[in-house]
Amino acid sequence: MAATETKPSELAKWDPGLTERVMGLTRPFLKRYFRSQVRGLDNIPGGGALLVSNHSGGLFPMDVPILAADFYGQHGYHRPLYTLSHDMLMTGPTGDFFRRIGFISANRENADEALRSGGLVVVFPGGDYDVYRPTLSENVIDFGGRTGYVKAALNAGVPIVPTVGIGGQQTQIFLSRGTWLAKRLGPIARLARTKIVPISFGFPFGLSLVVPPNIPLPAKIVMQVLPPIDIEAEFGQDPDIDEVDAHVRRVMQRALDELAAERRLPVLG
């Protein structure tokens, strides 16, 4: 089916009733197990906006559930919070479920449609590269050189809302992205469409190369939504993409450093 045909139907699958039920079930768990907090939700503008966040937690990232639970809890269920997601999440028997709670395939058409509709769209520019960053570099904003998010915001004429999270890389010990291992695996890694084979250590299986999947430790996770960035107002009508990206990452790094300074102990927060 052509992209122009799948685009509206995929967005239209968002089900506010199901989303509310899912949030009702997950919110108590997130608040008790991860002691989750989301600050700065009032910074989210009324129209379309691109929420740009670092990504944490490996195979079980909690960024989206935590952000969504507090967003819907404060703003209600009349406005969808979309998340641009890897195709692997959108296939198989669970694909329809994720679409109904706001996940959409990460492509230019979906992003543009969602933003122009006045929706909020969450994107993790660093993707797998970011979500598996070593725990020793947990408080570093690194998108791996990806700047497509800036073009997406410019194309749709919406602001970028920087968002940062801390604590997700303490749910287990992330040792390495395993880029060197992916290179050694060669055709096997290419068949899996991955440039990383992450290595981590956790409970109950100990050392893991993605599998077996360890259970996330109950690390305290805090997210901070920052004031929106109007790209054209700050950088002109023909902005330099790399300059905007550098500015966004600087703003995010400063906020993440402030969150890191508040923490006293690993996992406990």
Image (tube, rainbow, N blue to C red):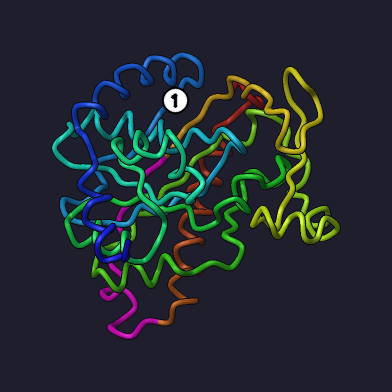
Q: Quadrant of the N terminus?
A: bottom left
Q: Position of residue 230 (x, y in %)?
A: 28, 67
- The answer to whether 154 appears left or right of 55 in the picture is left
Asked where in the image residue 117 lies, by quadrant, the reply is bottom left
Q: Position of residue 110 (x, y in %)?
A: 31, 59
- 237 magenta-colored: yes
Q: Which residue is painted at 23% across and 51% down in the image?
A: 9
Bounds of the magenta segment: 224-239
- The answer to whether 113 appears left or right of 235 in the picture is left
Q: Position of residue 68 (x, y in %)?
A: 33, 34
Residue at image mark 1: 36
- 269 magenta-colored: no
Q: Which residue is painted at 24% across and 50% down in the image?
A: 11
Q: Would you place residue 215 above or below residue 236 in this image?
A: above
Q: Would you place residue 126 above or below residue 102 in this image?
A: below
- The answer to whether 251 appears left or right of 260 in the picture is left
Q: Which residue is at the front of the view, 113 or 63?
A: 113
Q: Would you place residue 7 above or below residue 86 in this image?
A: below
Q: Which residue is at the front of the view, 254 or 221?
A: 221
Name the outermost residue toward the right.
184
Q: How many marks?
A: 1
Name the outermost residue toward the bottom.
238
Q: Position of residue 174 (x, y in %)?
A: 72, 38
At label 1, the amino acid type is Ser
Q: Which residue is painted at 18% across and 33% down in the image?
A: 77
Name the outermost residue toward the front.
1
Q: Tag 1's secondary structure?
A: loop
Question: Crowding at label 1, few (<14), some or many (≥20) Cα neighbours within 10 Å?
Answer: many
Q: Which residue is painted at 77% across and 32% down in the image?
A: 208
Q: Quadrant of the C terminus?
A: top right
Q: Would you place residue 257 above or below residue 27 in this image?
A: below
